[in-house]
Image (spheres, helix red, strand yellow):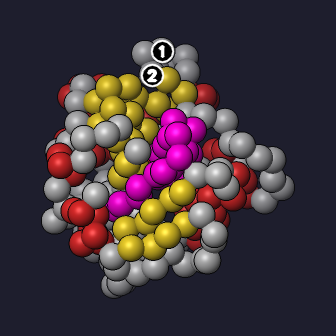
Amino acid sequence: MLVIGNGESRIDLDLNSYKNTKVGCNAIHRDHYVHHLVCCDRRMVLEAQEKLNYGKIYTRPDWKDQFKSCGLVPPLPYKGETRPDNPWHWGSGPYALLLGAYLSENTVHIIGFDIGSETDKVNNIYKSTPNYNDADTKPVDPSYWIYQMNKVFECFDKTQFIYYNNKPWPKIINNVISKRTEEFNEI
């Protein structure tokens, strides 16, 4: 199982060499076929439905009447009291990871989840394209993404998560292995 984010760390990776199930989010359908596409933004759902470069698309339960042909993102596997625990505050990336965890039997490879930016600008390979922020926009605070992805790791503690990035995952968790981005091409 491969879960793909849209961070710039995945630019030079050969996603087509990975032959198993792929879960991606938002505009990945522009460049790559994925078996499961997660779009939590209405504009992204509409765009993806025009191109149809995916196996199945998932969106928020709140929009099930508007997007009847879409599947729904899975329910959160825990109950929480904080704002990041509210399903409405989960974005496509954390939901893609959650879906990958539900669909996986034992191992989830994670690429393109850069968890922040090395600069004061947005880190997304689709920046300055339709439905995305301009390249000179400030980056999104990744604290919700980190919190939510950690919740997935904690709730799926029997699953091995392998995170490919040149910066290790920001928190030590027993079932998360950090590897350098280049190591992805070896799987």
For label 2, the SS is loop
For label 1, the SS is loop
- In the rendered structure, the answer to whether residue 176 lies left or right of residue 135 reads right
- Label count reads 2
In this figure, which residue is indicated by the disc labeled 2? 70
Q: Compute the Cα span from label 2 to label 1.
A: 6 Å
Q: Vertically, is 138 above or below 78? A: below
The boundaries of the magenta stretch are 93-112
**Which mark is on residue 181?**
none
Q: Is residue 111 magenta?
A: yes
- Between 49 and 136, the one lying in front of the other is 49
**Residues at circles 2 and 1 in contact by the CB criterion of under 8 Å:** yes
How far from the left and from the top, in percent, is residue 31? 17, 45
Residue drawn where x is 28% and y is 45% of the image: 27
Residue 44, quarter of picture:
top left
Can residue 25 be seen here?
no
